[in-house]
Amino acid sequence: MLRRLLSNWLSGCLLLSQLVWAATAVAAPKSVSLVYEATRNGQPFATVTESYKQENGRYRIESVTKGVGVYALLGERRLTSEGDVTANGLKPSHFELRQGSNERKFLFTDFDWAANTLTMKIKGKPTTVPLEKGTQDLTSFAYQFMFTPPQGDALVLPVTTGKKLRIYNYTVVERDAPVDLPAGKFKTIHLTNASKNDPEQQTDKQSANDEKELWLGREAYSLPVRIVMYDDGGAKIEQTLTSLHVE
């Protein structure tokens, strides 16, 4: 009798977990197209166009930044991420960052989940480090929120920049924070970088500037509708959503 009750209980737990995953999979869209305007100290300097597609348990994300005016001379910046869609959300297998046509600036990252290793190729030279559980890349981490929106007051996010593996610490500043953007009005979850004032986390210039302040749109599948960061010179870079299309 006890064995039968235990078996029924385990079956019920398994069914419940499958239903939860099914509900999450249904809730997350199969295709998303977003357009952002990027400003530098309040002046437009680029347009960011992103696409997310999910099919047969795989996903692909592409983010293309094109400068406007004199910034167009810098060439486009293209980031791509691809991998599996799992019960825990996105599980990247490959990430690329291409800036202009200079191949020396290209970054390639491969995730070996079986061996728990992350290999980042910089200027053609591979660097391998241990792969942290739940690691995302610069592109996929924003779309992971579609599957696992922030529940508590603090988040720990392992993210590869293509050069290093960073552990980002974020704090939920406000929930239902109203934001009025060209794409519409949104209630957002406002996340700020909790480690930006921690000297131990700021080991070099890149770590001081590659973390972002995020506003996740509740009516936009918890995707970022506003992003604020600072460049190497301390200029404020703001990215705001101008268009959102979901299928």
Image (spheres, rainbow, N blue to C red):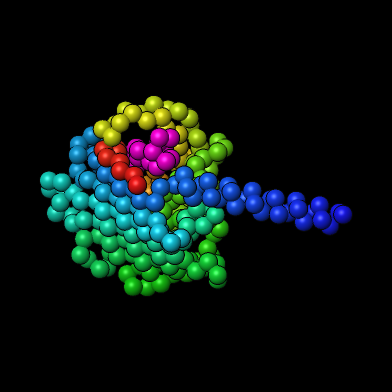
Residue placed most toward the observer, 188 or 246: 246
Q: Nearer the viewer, residue 157 or 86?
A: 86
Is there any visible trace of residue 239 in the rendered image?
no
* Whole-percent x, y for residue 119 in the image: 45, 68
Left/right placement of residue 221 relative to residue 47 reads right
Identify the residue at horizontal 40%, vertical 35% (top origin): 219
Q: Is residue 15 magenta?
A: no
Q: Is residue 43 above or below residue 137?
A: above
Occupied quadrant, residue 226: top left
Q: Is residue 153 among what the camera can see? A: yes
The outermost residue toward the bottom is 125
Q: Is residue 218 magenta?
A: yes
* 39 lies above or below 102: above
Residue appearing at x 20%, y 51% in the figure: 66
Q: Quadrant of the N terminus?
A: bottom right
| Residue 34 percent location from the top left of the image | 30, 45
> Where does the magenta region start and end?
214-231
Residue 43, picture quadrant? top left
Q: Main secondary structure of the magenta part?
A: strand
Q: Nearer the viewer, residue 26 or 38?
A: 26
Q: Quadrant of residue 61?
A: bottom left
